[in-house]
Image (cartoon, rainbow, N blue to C red):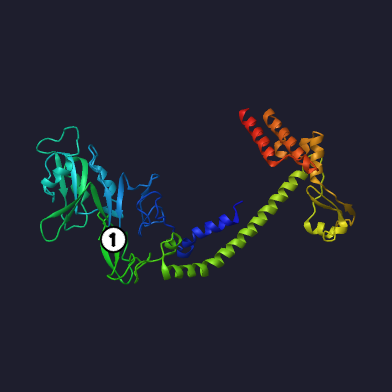
Amino acid sequence: MIDLKIFILLLISTFPTFISQKPYCDRTCPGSILTDLPYPFGFSAGCEIPLNCTPNGTVSIGEFSVQKVNEQELLVSVPSKCGRAVEALRGLYSDHYAPTSDNAILMENCTEKVRTCSVPETLIQPNLEVIDCGGERNASGNVSCYSDDRRSMFLDYENVTKTGCRFLLSGMVVKIVGDNPAVSLNVQVVRLGWWVKGKCECSDVAVCTEVVSPVDGGGGYRCECEEGLVGDGYKASSGCRKGSSGCSPSKFLFGHCEGSERAGILVGVVVIGAPLIACLGLIYRYIRHRTIAKSRGTSSRRLCEAKGITIPIYSFKDIEKATNGFSDKQKLGTGAYGTVYKGKIRKAVDFSRRHSEVNLASLAIDRIGKGNLDEIIDPFLKPIEDVSTLNSIRKVAEVAFRCLAFDSDMRPPMTEVASVLQQIRASNFAS
């Protein structure tokens, strides 16, 4: 049975889901430097664009690790590697992202020299000195660099594979500096552009950039807040607003909200969440009470159905009435297991009077002392005849016999009971 405090904590931890009524998206990867990913990225099925979170805290797309995620791009590490099939580049294409046209793809073992690269060879060679592919690179260079038309948004995968190159060595992101022909390189990485599928669903004060998927030709979009506003611009997320930061319920729970925003979301949580938690708490207590009552009733019936035992079962109201509300005049005494009362219970069928003074502890002591364990053990255990189980039952009965002693000085401490039970368990495993 789950503890009530744990139940409430679990409820609070999932409270943002109840408010939004949308599939939960886990945006944290334990141990990763990429924390609290922006919409629409995350690490669970409820996210628009799910990424992989490895057990060691690495965020990845296929075999490539992700270095950077923001509102415009994904930056993926593609370290220089010999013998990696050029088809590995296909893993960077999906229905939500693809390499952009400002990438330069370095390949080797080509049928002929590729001459479409926007990066001067004098800048490529220094970045390849640390790579040794078994001496296969000849003096004229067996490395080719492919770049696409920068007027297009994404790199054409089909054109890359048509170059006749077998291996994907690495990648570079090429940035044009100003109006001059100078370039800036980010080596051993590939830049991915991303989009949300469908028609524009941006905030009214956000700019929508339409995207055509290079994978299936479908429509997509990205949102960006207008200048002077903050937020991600998406209607499905935080939208756009004035101020320096936004405070969503998830950010509030992780302590990322400040000032009036934190106070505002706290008031909202209290007003909406308190009645919900109280209601669910009452439901939980009711279910727990019913479960315990049912369990006790089942245990009592099993005990009473054991061989040779005929113990009548009365309701609490019958016992309360028979003892005049547990009057002191009906009290027989107080023993090790509570107070014992005498009472007369009138059955509705024949109005005959029966006296009931049942002490289950005395009953158990009597049966254990006489060796009649089969009259009090669970009927489920009776068909079992293997020596190991029978010995375990006898040893547990001996411990129970000592624990049921009327004189408290004769009862063993719980540490000793635990030790004896552990020894019984160990001997059972050994056999």
| x, y percent for residue 19 | 47, 65
In the picture as drawn, the residue positioned furthest to the front comes out as 409
- Give the labeled residue for mark 1: 219
| Residue 421 x %, y % | 67, 36
Which amino acid lies under the numbered mark 1 shown in the image of this protein?
Gly
Q: Is residue 121 left or right of residue 318?
A: left
* 400 vs 352: above or below: above
Q: Is residue 275 above or below residue 322?
A: below
Residue 215 visible (yes or no): no
Q: How many marks?
A: 1
Up-down: is 149 above or below 373? below
Foreground residue among 331 and 95: 331
- Give the residue at the far right of this rendering: 352
Q: Residue at x 49, y 70 (%)?
A: 267
Q: x, y (%) of residue 205?
A: 31, 72
Q: Is residue 313 visible?
A: yes
Q: Residues within 10 Å of mark 1 (few under 14, many from 20)?
A: some
Q: Nearer the viewer, residue 361 or 136?
A: 361
297 left or right, relative to 48? right
- Closest to the observer: 45 or 404? 404
Residue 147 spot, x, y in % from top left: 16, 50
Residue drawn at x 79%, y 33% as measured from the top left: 371
- Report helix, strand or loop for mark 1: strand
Dividing the image into 4 quarters, which one contains the C terminus?
A: top right
